[in-house]
Image: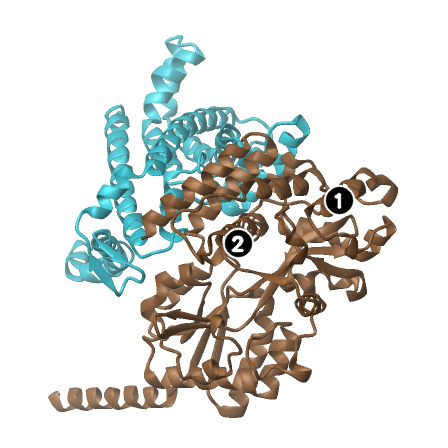
Chain colours: A brown, B cyan
């Protein structure tokens, strides 16, 4: 009897060994961007066909990335490749980030500032650079008697927008701006992206890159642009609380509004209007010298390699990433199919992005405009953004006043910063 | 038969026991352990003692969520049970189409909370817009009553079925005796039917009380806690603490909150069971 037991045990052990030996190295990418899920799946398949290394790509649902990552990383076959959104996001995952210095990714990176560092350790590397501003429908703009070149600062933006709003029936539109929806699918455009403007100018004025206590020097400008958005839109300000991201897209694509604040990633949604009818203008908020201001360019997508994974999986992951940014298939997929601007020096010539909105940014930078950096990655927490979002919604609907926004912005920043530091 | 059970009891008991341990006891103990720790993922934890619990009671949002939840629970428990009982009375009188009505009232229960939440959000926002009132996400009062309407709509049918079963089990001879003694229908209801359906009342109040107190999906979908957390209930508050914050310390605080929450639910349920059980009568 004992012998049989021993035999069975020995066999099981062998089996287990054999299975692990077969499984070898594999790559598991937990993708953040649902818009590009299909392209990643295809790319993974091509890589597996070429090299035999299995690559799994799982995409977390919108807004569920942290939750998904938290449970996935506990599993025995945890993601070997995941993402953080910047310094604040990194705080959660720094223990899990493999040092990427000296890797192919780092070598090909065009600009050191696209690496997320802690001291000398490279914790994450950006793989896509994005740009946002006010996307404008030039066809409608011309119909109203203007061109994008007429808008050079807040004053002219306000003049054009208010004139268009006043003549909306004549122009056959519902409003100058698309609805600034404060539903969860859209509120980040204002509580995060628009809020970047006063933060950027304050940092610039004070010569800093992050802070524990924001002063709110440019909050009056934030109010001015928000007032412009909500009072010259396709709907009453009180209705914004329930408007969604899809509503704004539908209004813009349906040519019911001229302006739509969003970024290069929105290209696929609005491409039906035709590249020749679209341009992007900077978000002017009425700061001295803003005529020279460009679009908001930066990243909140950093690749991190799971330091807890087996070394061979880490190596496989690094090899996969190198393939993605150097092979023809990978470069074509990222630049053309996903429409990304990729900050690696391998993406030149035919692999430069074909996204027309990106072209606008390139032109502006070439014309000497100063791009606005993405400082919202230094916002103290998600909680802070939610507080500002709620206050903006209440202000728009008239159930709250602007002081509420100021409190959420300034006091909320300090409270949240102190809580996390 | 009894002998067989005595001999094979493990075969009957073990599957359930195993499920209970895996699905309940183990996560519970693990959760208790984590509430004393700081962690990002549950395999890497640092012991921090009682500090998570201290922070729970220092957090004003937790306290305000508690009061919102308490108010909601009281109102919804009373409304759901009264309406469900009245419906059950109406639908045990042998009216035409009783079965159709029972089905109709029960149906909302089959739809998930998230879906219901979004559907009602659209409906209620539509009404509020037409009336020119602030939307659900702007005024916690509308959020509160919106949640009440939603919960009533969802739960009344289910509680009604339980009450119907209870009412059908009231012995006919008791009712007959009551009518021979000349009791009015109101007297029959209060003196005979109510005491006899007391077990159903115990179950229904238990279910509505705990369901309302633990409400999550509907809260998330209907109001999301807006405006500025004023319509946030305890479960959503815990979820937000755990997920909407960055930094490992919040996970532990969220965990401590959920332990406190669990104790609250247990205490409330036990008190309620004690009081309604006392009123139950033997047939």
How many other residues sit within 10 Å of disc 2, few (<14), some (14-19) or many (≥20)?
many
Chain for numbered disc 1: A
Labels 2 and 1 touching (C-beta < 8 A): no
* Element marked by disc 2: helix
- Identify the residue at image location x=17%, y=51%: B49
How far is mark 2 from mark 1, CA to CA? 24 Å
Closer to us: B41 or A292: A292
Chain for numbered disc 2: A
User: For mark 1, what is the residue?
Assistant: A161
How many other residues sit within 10 Å of disc 1, few (<14), some (14-19) or many (≥20)?
many
Q: Quadrant of residue A76?
A: bottom left
Using the rendered image of the protein, determine whether residue B154 is visible from the camera's viewpoint. Answer: no
Q: Quadrant of residue A129?
A: bottom right
Q: Quadrant of residue A134?
A: bottom right
- Identify the residue at image location x=38%, y=50%: A212
- Identify the residue at image location x=36%, y=48%: B241
* Residues tagged by mark 2 and mark 1 found on one chain of the structure: yes
Quadrant for the N terminus of chain B in the image: bottom left
Which mark's residue is nearer the viewer, 2 or 1?
2
Closer to us: A1 or A238: A238
Using the rendered image of the protein, determine whether residue A196 is visible from the camera's viewpoint. Answer: yes
- Identify the residue at image location x=56%, y=51%: A197
Residue B265 image point, x, y percent? 29, 38
Residue B198 image point, x, y percent? 32, 27
Q: Residue furthest top?
A: B182
Query: Residue A106, relative to residue B92: is it above or below?
Result: below
User: For mark 2, what is the residue?
Assistant: A200
Query: Residue B109, relative to residue A101: is it above or below?
Result: above
Residue A148 image point, x, y percent? 78, 56
């Amino acid at each position: 009897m004992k012998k049989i037991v021993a035999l069975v045990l020995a066999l099981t052990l062998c089996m287990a060994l054999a299975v692990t030996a077969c499984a070898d190295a594999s790559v598991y990418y937990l993708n953040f961007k649902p818009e590009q899920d299909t392209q990643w799946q295809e790319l993974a398949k091509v890589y597996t066909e070429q090299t035999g290394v299995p690559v799994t790509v799982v995409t977390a649902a919108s807004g569920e990335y942290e939750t998904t990552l938290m449970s996935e990383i506990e599993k025995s076959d945890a993601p070997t490749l995941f993402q953080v959104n910047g310094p604040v996001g990194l705080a959660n995952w720094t223990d899990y980030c493999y040092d990427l210095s000296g890797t192919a990714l780092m070598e090909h990176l065009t600009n050191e500032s696209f690496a997320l560092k802690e001291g000398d350790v490279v914790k994450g590397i950006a793989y896509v650079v994005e740009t946002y501003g006010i996307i404008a429908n030039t066809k409608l703009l011309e119909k109203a008697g203007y061109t994008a070149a007429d808008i050079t600062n807040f004053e002219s933006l306000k003049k054009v927008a208010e004139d268009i709003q006043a003549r909306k029936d004549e122009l056959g539109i519902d409003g100058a701006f698309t609805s600034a929806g404060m539903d969860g699918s859209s509120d980040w455009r204002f509580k995060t992206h628009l809020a970047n403007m006063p933060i950027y100018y304050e940092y610039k004025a004070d010569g800093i890159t992050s802070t524990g206590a924001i002063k709110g020097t440019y909050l009056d400008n934030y109010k001015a642009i928000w007032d412009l958005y909500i009072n010259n839109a396709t709907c009453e300000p009180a209705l914004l609380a329930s408007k969604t991201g899809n509503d704004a897209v539908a209004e813009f694509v349906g040519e019911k509004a001229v302006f739509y604040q969003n970024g290069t990633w929105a290209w696929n949604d609005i491409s039906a209007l035709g590249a020749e009818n679209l341009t992007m203008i900077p978000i002017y908020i009425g700061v001295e010298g803003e005529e020279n201001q460009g679009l908001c360019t930066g990243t909140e997508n950093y690749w991190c390699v799971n330091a807890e994974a087996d070394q061979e999986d880490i190596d496989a992951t690094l090899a996969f990433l190198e393939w993605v940014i150097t092979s023809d298939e990978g470069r074509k997929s990222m630049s053309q199919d996903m429409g990304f601007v990729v900050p690696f020096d391998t993406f030149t010539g035919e692999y430069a992005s074909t996204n027309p909105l990106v072209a606008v940014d390139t032109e502006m930078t070439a014309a000497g405009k100063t791009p606005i950096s993405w400082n919202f990655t230094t916002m103290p927490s998600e909680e802070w953004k939610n507080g500002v979002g709620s206050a903006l919604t209440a202000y728009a609907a008239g159930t709250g006043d602007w002081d509420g926004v100021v409190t959420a912005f300034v006091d909320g920043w300090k409270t949240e910063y102190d809580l996390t530091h | 038969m009894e002998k067989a059970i005595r001999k094979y009891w493990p075969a009957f008991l073990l599957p359930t026991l195993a499920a209970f341990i895996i699905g309940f006891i183990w996560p519970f103990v693990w959760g208790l352990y984590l509430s004393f720790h700081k962690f990002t993922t549950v395999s890497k934890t640092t012991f921090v003692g009682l500090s998570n619990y201290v922070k729970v009671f220092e957090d004003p949002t937790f306290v305000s969520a508690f009061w919102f939840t308490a108010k909601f629970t009281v109102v919804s428990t009373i409304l759901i049970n009264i309406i469900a009982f009245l419906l059950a009375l109406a639908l045990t009188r042998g009216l035409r189409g009783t079965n159709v009505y029972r089905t109709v009232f029960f149906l909302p229960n089959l739809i998930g909370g998230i879906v219901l939440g979004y559907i009602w959000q659209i409906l209620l926002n539509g009404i509020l817009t037409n009336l020119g009132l602030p939307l659900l996400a702007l005024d916690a009062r509308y959020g509160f009553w919106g949640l009440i309407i939603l919960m009533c709509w969802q739960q009344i049918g289910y509680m009604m079925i339980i009450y119907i079963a209870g009412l059908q089990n009231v012995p006919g001879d008791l009712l007959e005796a009551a009518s021979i003694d000349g009791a009015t229908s109101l007297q029959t209801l209060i003196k005979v039917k109510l005491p006899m359906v007391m077990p159903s009342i115990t179950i229904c109040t238990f279910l509505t009380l705990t369901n309302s107190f633990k409400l999550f999906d509907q809260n998330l979908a209907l109001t999301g806690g807006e405006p500025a957390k004023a319509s946030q209930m305890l479960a959503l508050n815990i979820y937000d603490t755990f997920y909407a914050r960055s930094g490992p310390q919040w996970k532990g605080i969220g965990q401590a909150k959920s332990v406190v929450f669990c104790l609250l639910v247990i205490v409330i349920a036990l008190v309620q069971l004690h009081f309604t059980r006392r009123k139950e009568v033997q047939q």
